[in-house]
Amino acid sequence: MHIRMDWRAVKFDWNKARAFLVTAEEGSLSAAARALGMAQPTLGRQVDGLEQELGIVLFERVGRGLTLTPSGMELLEHVREMGKAAGRVSLTAMGQSQALEGTISISASETYAAVLLPPIVAKLRIEEPGIHVEIVVANHASDLLRREADIAIRNFRPTEPDLIAKKIGMADAVLYAAPNYVARLGHPQTPYDLRHADFVNMDRSGMMLKALNGLGLGLTEANFPLLTENYIVMWELVKQGAAIGILDAQIGDADPDVVRVLPDLEPLKFPIWLVAHRELTTSRRIRRVYDFLIEELKRT
């Protein structure tokens, strides 16, 4: 099926096109709304508005998700190219800005956004009051090429050639539990002592189970009766004595409500990278914040 229309007669709205693009890539309105940080009804109205303006049906409902119609599939390729072009225009404009005043968006996971970033941002605001900071909380990797954020704190090195990254260092991930839960386990001394312990699972892929078993714990899926992809929820479950959780040692050791489980167990190690788009480094504002974050993150 080929879409034929007079594009000169179409009143084009990029916001609606972006809503369609993200919905198509995420597979549902709810997921797209979370990715864009907007209300689902608002997103739905934008998609509906695009369908009405173009006079075509873009999606069909399949269960709780959405699938593209043939017209939607054809339009998607055009809108995806428009998105890339819009991103390049925005990046170029930002890269050529030499003003320090303005807004910077920083993407980080829930724990880093809630614990590590606030004191750093507070210090930045004192030194650079003209810079406004937007903190994008996302456990997934924000798409810097689409300007979901200007700078991102990640636990992996990016592979995209248009991104630059600075490795801040390595962090330790350690097992924690509430003191009363450790007591109920009989104060375990060896990995074998955790064979009947409960853990809070943070992913559906089994990576956490595999990683912990790599440390010699010998766990099974039965050891993970709790699941959440939200780090703040996981930590509250741990502090309430529901199960064992794993977290960056710098954050966990600072919380008086928990203790390390098997303190002598080798920690899981993961890198911390600071990432930005290559063109953004030509902006004084982006460069100032990028360098500031490097300095402060290394210090902490």
Image (cartoon, grey):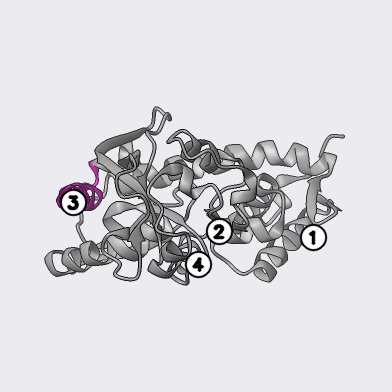
Report the Cα–Cα distance between label 2 and label 3: 26 Å
Q: Along the line of sight, which residue is nearer the eye, 173 or 107?
A: 173
Q: Nearer the viewer, mark 2 or mark 4?
A: 4
Tag 3 and tag 4, C-beta contact below 8 Å:
no
Q: Along the line of sight, which residue is nearer the eye, 132 or 267?
A: 267
**Circle 3 sits on which residue?**
288
Q: Nearer the viewer, mark 3 or mark 1?
A: 3
Amino acid type, callout 2:
Leu
Q: Earlier in the sequence, mark 2 or mark 1?
A: 2
Report the Cα–Cα distance between label 3 and label 1: 45 Å
Q: Earlier in the sequence, mark 3 or mark 4?
A: 4
**Circle 4 sits on which residue?**
237
Question: For residue 95, which numbered disc appears in the image?
Answer: none
Residue 152 position, x and y percent, is 36, 48
Q: Earlier in the sequence, mark 2 or mark 3?
A: 2
Q: Nearer the viewer, mark 2 or mark 1?
A: 2
**Circle 2 sits on which residue?**
36
**What span is in magenta?**
282-300
Q: Along the line of sight, which residue is nearer the eye, 13 or 67?
A: 67
Q: Earlier in the sequence, mark 2 or mark 4?
A: 2
Magenta part, dominant SS: helix
